[in-house]
Image: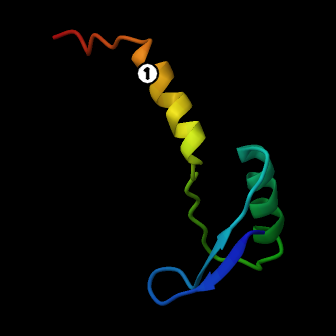
Amino acid sequence: MEALYYSFGDYDGFVIIDAPDEATVTAILLAALAPGHLRATKTTVLMRPETMVEAMKKAGELSYPGPDK
């Protein structure tokens, strides 16, 4: 766990977790949801700048023709 923040609004808190993959985060969420420790969750994948740069390079190598009309 990188950080924990409490908040007002739809959710009472935010947790920032640095995990090796989405399956690990899902396992953590399932383990916390099962006994009722959490009522609702929302996950957002954050990307480091170098990951975004890698994605932009890959996008530059691809073409997307769009849907057929």
Is 15 on the left or on the right of 35, as rendered?
left
What kind of element bears circle 1?
helix
Which of the image's four quarters has the N terminus? Answer: bottom right
Which of the image's four quarters has the C terminus? Answer: top left
Local crowd size for mark 1, using a 10 Å CA cut-off: few (<14), some (14–19), many (≥20): few
Is 14 on the left or on the right of 17, as rendered?
left
Amino acid type of the residue tagged 1 in the rendering: Ala
Is 34 on the left or on the right of 22, as rendered?
right
Can you give x and y, in whole percent of width and height, for residue 44 in the image? Answer: 55, 56
Task: Name the residue that disc number 1 marks.
Answer: 59
User: Can you name the residue that lies furthest to the left here?
Assistant: 69
For the point 53% across and 87% down, the residue is 7
The colour scheme of the drawn protein is: rainbow
For the point 59% across and 40% down, the residue is 50
Can you give x and y, in whole percent of width and height, for residue 9 in the image? Answer: 44, 85
For the point 66% across and 72% down, the residue is 15
Residue 47 against residue 29 in the figure, above or below: above
Is 2 on the left or on the right of 11, as rendered?
right
Can you give x and y, in whole percent of width and height, for residue 10 in the image? Answer: 46, 80
Residue 19 against residue 55 in the figure, above or below: below
Can you give x and y, in whole percent of width and height, for residue 14 in the image? Answer: 60, 76
